Image: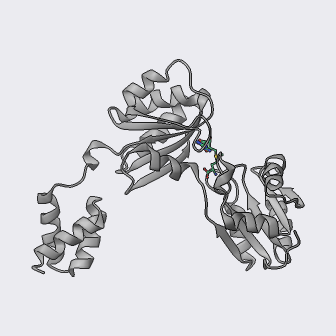
Amino acid sequence: MENTTLTPGLYIVATPIGNLGDITLRAAEVLRGCDHVLAEDKRVSAKLLRHLGASKPMTAYNDHSDAADRARIVERLGREAVALVSDAGTPLISDPGYKLVRAAREAGIAVHTLPGPSAAIAALTLAGLPTDRFLFAGFLPPKAKARAEAIAEVGAVRATLVFYESGPRLGDTLEALRDALGARDAAVVREISKLHEETVTGPLVELAARYAKAGPKGEIVVVVGPPADAAEASDEELDSALRTALASESASRAAATVAAALAVPRKRAYARALELAGR
Ligand code: SAM
C-alpha cells in the first residue's frame, strides 16, 4: 500500500509475542502504510507483513548495526515513514533500537511509538505477584559468576523482579535465584499467548527443584516477588511517617512523599493522610 498519510519519521511498532491477533489496529495501519521497514530479522518480519497483506522494502536493524548504518537510516527518516520492528514484542525492550531513537532525535526527526505487546508486562499480569513496583532486569548473564553478581545487584531492590529467559538456561537461573534470594515467591511464565501458554507459581525453592533436570521448551519470563521486608508498611508505620510529613506538607504532597518512601499505594497513603489531617 502506498504511503498517503504517514509523515516522514521513525515509527516504533510493537508486534505480537505469539498470537498474531494481538497486532494493534495502529500497528497494522503503520506497517501497511509506511515506506520502509527496519527489521531485526527480515524473514521474521516478512511473515508478519504477509499476514497483513503488505510487502515493504526492508533493511536489517539489529545488534550488529553500527553508527554508519544509523547515519544512513537517519538520512532516510528525513524523507520517509520508517517502521522499526523486532522479531516479537516491543522494540528496544531487550531488543535493539535505543541508539537509533537517540540518533533520530539528535537529527530533529519525529519519533512515534505504537504501544503493544511486551512479554515482561504480559508476564507480570499472569504471575500474581505485586505489580506496584517492578524492576525489569532483562536477560541475566550466561556465566555463573556474572549471573550471581547481577542477581546480587538487584536482589535488595524492594520490587518484583522480571527476567527474560530461555528453556535450556531456566534450571541454572532458578538455582542461582534460589541461592541468592531464598524463599521468595516466583512465577515461571512460558509461551504467552501461544498454544502451550503456562504459568507455574511457587517459592523459588520449589521452582528450582521442578526445573532442575530439564528446562521446558519455548520462551520464558521469570518473575520473582519482592523481598519479605518489602511487605506493605503497617498502619502504625504509615501513620507515623504521615504525621511527620503532614507537619510540613499538604495531605496530597505528604501522601506522595510517604507512598514513595514506604512503597505503599498512593491511594492508601492519601486516604489515611486525609483522615489524619482531620478532613
Ligand atoms: N522485545 C520483546 C518484548 O517486548 O517482550 C522481548 C525480546 S527478547 C529478545 C525475547 C525474550 O522475551 C524471550 O527470550 C523471552 O524471555 C521473552 N518472550 C518473548 N515472547 C514471549 C512469550 N510469548 N512468552 C514468554 N516469554 C516471551
Residue at the image point whose x is 74% and y is 77% from the top: 109
Q: Quadrant of the C terminus?
A: bottom left
Quadrant of residue 259 within the rendered picture: bottom left
User: Which of 220 and 107 lies nearest the eye of the viewer?
Assistant: 220
Q: Nearer the viewer, residue 216 or 193?
A: 193
Q: Could you say where residue 173 lies in the image, as x and y percent from the top left?
A: 51, 31
Question: What is the total number of numbered labels drawn onto the structure image?
Answer: 0
Which quadrant of the figure has residue 203?
Answer: top left
Ligand 1 shown in quarter: top right
Q: Is residue 238 above or below residue 4?
A: above
- Would you say 195 lies left or right of 135 here? right
Residue 187 left/right relative to 48 = left
- Return the x and y of residue 79 as percentages of the image width and height: 86, 77
Quadrant housing the N terminus? bottom right
Q: Nearer the viewer, residue 259 or 194?
A: 194
Residue depicted at 54% across the width and 36% down the height: 146
Residue 134: give x, y in percent of width and height: 42, 53
Name the residue at 83% across, 77% down.
78
Give the vertical position of 8 relative to 35 (above or below): below
Residue depicted at 39% across the width and 53% down the height: 131
Is residue 187 visible in the rendered structure shown here?
yes
